[in-house]
Image (cartoon, rainbow, N blue to C red):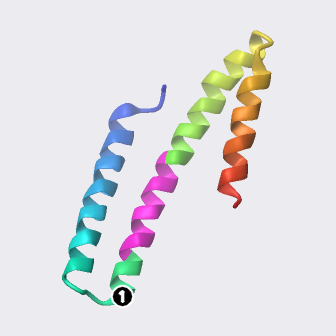
Amino acid sequence: MRSDREKVMRLLKTARGQIDGLMRMVEEDRYCVDISNQILATQAILRNVNSQILHDHLNHCVREAMETDDAAEKINEIMSIIDKLTK
């Protein structure tokens, strides 16, 4: 992985902290809309991290594979991810 590891790790730790907070909110029987808003915020962080990782994958791994005529597998991997993202 060639993404900015420190930035990715910071964002993932933030998401983990938000999930811990969500669990406390559920245990405390907090207001449903507040829980939902927190879930949306956590999902936004994870989408951001995924986007960064995929951009870096395209710019590095896929680009290198195309230069060595070994792109078919990398393209299939990206297509699989796109399929998952659009479901």
Q: Amino acid at mark 1?
A: Cys
Tell me if residue 24 comes above or below residue 2 in the rendering: below
Q: Nearer the viewer, residue 8 or 83?
A: 83
Residue at the farthest front position: 27
Q: Is residue 37 left or right of residue 70?
A: left
Tell me if residue 80 comes above or below residue 57 in the rendering: below
Number of callouts: 1
Q: Nearer the viewer, residue 84 or 38?
A: 84
| Crowd around label 1: few <14 · some 14–19 · many ≥20 (10 Å) | few
The segment highlighted magenta reads 38-49
Residue at the image point whose x is 53% and y is 38% from the top: 53
User: Which element is circle 1 on?
Assistant: helix
Residue at the image point whose x is 71% and y is 42% from the top: 80
Residue at the image point whose x is 71% and y is 27% from the top: 74
Q: Identify residue for label 1.
A: 32
Magenta stretch encompasses residue 52: no
Magenta stretch encompasses residue 46: yes
Residue at the image point whose x is 30% and y is 63% from the top: 19
Could you say which quadrant of the image residue 14 lies in? Answer: bottom left
User: Principal SS element in the magenta part?
Assistant: helix
Residue 6 % position (x, y): 33, 35
